[in-house]
Image (cartoon, helix red, strand yellow):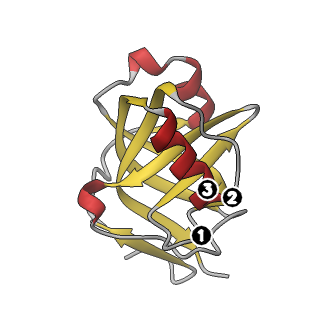
Amino acid sequence: PPPTHIYTLGRSSAASDVYKRQLQTLLDNPADYLDTSVRVEARISQVCQKKGCFMIASAGDRAVRISFRDYSFFVPTDTSGKTVTLTGTLVERVLSEKQAAHFREDAGSDTIQAGKVYEIVADAVSIPRS
């Protein structure tokens, strides 16, 4: 069982056998990891403040949006600043300016830009308790 100071949202059994990667490695070489299962530890810089339906993870000067598979779970809106472990799939998307503006408004940040982006669609997120 997981430690009591951590709780998991989503499928707790999601790809526990997937090798853990550094987020910076994924962001530096996204083509190497596209459409494959990944497990990363990431510091959350922003969370959708409306309902926690996405978050932004940062590594150095790079950032990636993390959504949740089939909209099946959300994270607490106070998750910013925590380091989480997530399991999911790295995908490539093209965001319209309208979509990017919507995400920027919900996150309260200008991190998300229109155009080709990489995103992690998470099956599970393990979050430390406060």
In the rendered image, which quarter is residue 120 located in? top left
Q: CA distance from mark 1 to mark 3?
A: 9 Å
**Does dot 3 land on a helix, a strand or a loop?**
helix
Residue ID at (32%, 53%): 16
**Residue 118: image location, x then y, percent:** 46, 30
The tag earlier along the polypeptide, 1 or 3, is: 1
Q: Position of residue 61 (x, y in %)?
A: 76, 31
Tell me the SS state at disc 1: loop
Establish if 1 lies above or below 71: below
- Is disc 2 in contact with disc 1, using a CB cutoff of under 8 Å? yes
- The residue identified by callout 2 is 108
Q: CA distance from mark 2 to mark 1?
A: 8 Å
**Residue drawn at point x = 57 percent, y = 60 percent:** 106
Give the mark nearest the N terminus, 2 or 1: 1
**Which quadrant does the C terminus fall into?**
bottom right
Specify the amino acid type for callout 2: Gly
| Residue placed most toward the observer, 107 or 96 | 96
**Can you tell which mark lies on residue 49?**
1
- Residue type, numbered disc 3: Glu
Label 1 Cα neighbours within 10 Å, binned few <14 / some 14-19 / many ≥20: some
Label 2's element? loop
Mark 3 Cα-neighbour bin, 10 Å: few <14, some 14–19, many ≥20: some
| Residue pointed to by mark 3 | 105
Mark 2 touches mark 3? (CB < 8 Å): yes
* On-image quarter of the N terminus: bottom left
Residue located at (34% from left, 70% from top): 73
Q: CA distance from mark 2 to mark 3?
A: 5 Å
Give the residue type at disc 1.
Answer: Gln
Q: Residues within 10 Å of mark 2 (few under 14, many from 20)?
A: some
Instruction: Report the front residue among 95 and 45.
Output: 95
